[in-house]
Amino acid sequence: MRVVPEVRSPPVADLQGDWQHPLMRYVLALLIFLGGCGSSERFDSQRWRNADLETRERANMVGSLIKARRLDGMDRASVVALLGEPTPTDKWDGSEMIYVLGPDGSMFPIDNEWLLIELDQQGRVAGYQVRPD
């Protein structure tokens, strides 16, 4: 009878928690790289107002606008001064101010992304969100 030696690779559990392992360092570097590959650009009011709505120019700036919380507590006139007039649409009932951000970020974009702004009873920004069609 011939005995064949068993070849075993290290179990996955042996790699968990061992960040010194070359594979784990590679995976971590890849995740950091991919996390930093977003198309976020600094918000610029003039560029926003003049953006070609067939591109993702607004979509690329909206993250910085939201992160800076520039809309918080603004009245309607101040939002219009910053972003321009809202996009005319009947797509989102119940949202007072709606801005098209451009085509969604998929490989074959058929929908748009939108910035929906809610106002409180005093006409100030109470909330906002980015939504796809």
Image (spheres, rainbow, N blue to C red):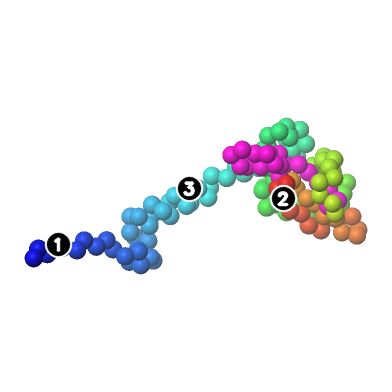
Label 2 element class:
strand
Instruction: Say whether residue 107 is magenta.
Output: yes
Tag 1: amino acid = Val
Label 3 element class:
helix
User: Circle 2 is placed at which residue position?
Assistant: 131
Give above or below for 50 relative to 24: above
User: Circle 3 is placed at which residue position?
Assistant: 33
Residue 11 drawn at (x, y percent) = 31, 65
Residue 118 drawn at (x, y percent) = 82, 55
Tag 3: amino acid = Phe
* Mark 3 surroundings: few (<14), some (14-19) or many (≥20) residues within 10 A: few
User: Circle 1 is placed at which residue position?
Assistant: 4
Q: Are marks 1 and 2 in contact (CB under 8 Å)?
A: no
Looking at marks 3 and 2 on the same chain, the residue that comes earlier in the sequence is marked by 3
Which residues make up the magenta segment?
95-113
Give above or below for 113 relative to 22: above
**Residue at 83%, 48% in the rendered image:** 97
Q: CA distance from mark 3 to mark 1?
A: 43 Å
